[in-house]
Image (cartoon, helix red, strand yellow):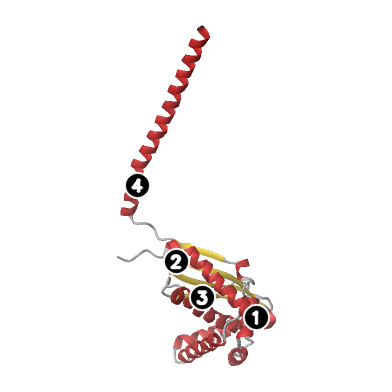
Amino acid sequence: MVEAQCSVQLCFPVELKNENMMEDVHFVGFLSKLLETKIVQVLRFKYGQIYSAGVSVFLGGNKPSRVGNIRGDISINFSCDPDISSTLVDLALEEILHLQEEGPSIDDVLAVLEIEQRAHENGLQENYYWLDRILRSYQSRIYSGDIGNSFKIQDAARSKVRSILMPLTAQLALQRILPFPCKKQYTVVILMPQASRIKRLKSLMQSVPKSYSRDAKILAGIAGVMVLSLSLWKYSRSTLKS
């Protein structure tokens, strides 16, 4: 029998400054891969409580503008046992805070660079990748009528971020892009599984006798108090007459 799982989303607001927009967009991509890798390492391989985790990025939370900051969010998603969902959220926050305060290791950075490079090379062979590139280039604030020039600017920003991505620069980017400390501002949504009708019926049937038993004890207690009060009243009356 498959155990019920809950769905957890841990979300952080993101705001990218216009002056560093192109580089920070690529930093967000690298950091999302870093967060996904570290969350899986901690929650799956260290604690054995999840199977996988995903990190999604949304950067469309602002009005169209060529000069304004870019707003959006970074979300971490995973499924787990409902009874430990809050505990795993705390563990995820602790790991992200550790990355912000101590920075990732050089092995972490090299792994992220390799993952990104492999995804980039695989994407070059797929039509959906080029469709996405074309759409993002047309919709980018750097587009000025020449889509080829937009490609060049984006590729140059990616190459620059790859060349400077080190443990320290990754740490500073985590502090700059995410709320720092990360526990200062975040949103958690936990979707709990609904109990089956059979379980709810059993729970209801078990609660009914307990409810009757509790009510009977309360009524018996009230009756006892009333009898005692009546006896004391009669005794006081007889004492006064004598």
**Residue lying furthest top:** 242
In the foreground, 109 or 163: 109
Look at the numbered discs 1 and 3 and tell me whether their residues touch, using CB distance below 8 Å: no
* Closer to viewer: mark 2 or mark 1: 1
Residue 172, image x and y in percent? 65, 80
- Image spot of residue 144 (x, y percent): 64, 87
Of the image marks 2 and 4, the number of the one nearer the N terminus:
2
Q: Relative to 170, does residue 194 appear above or below in the rendering?
A: above
Q: In 3D space, how far apart are the residues under numbered discs 2 and 1 (Cα atoms)?
A: 30 Å
Residue labelled with disc 3: 56
What label sits on residue 172 in the rendered view?
Answer: 1
Q: Distance between the residues labelled 1 and 4?
A: 54 Å
User: Which secondary structure lies at badge 2?
Assistant: strand
Nearest to viewer (mark 2 / mark 3): 2
**Quarter of the figure with residue 143:** bottom right
Q: Which residue does the numbered mark 2 point to in the structure image?
A: 7
Q: Mark 1 or mark 2, which is nearer the start of the sequence?
A: 2
Q: Which amino acid does label 2 sit on?
A: Ser
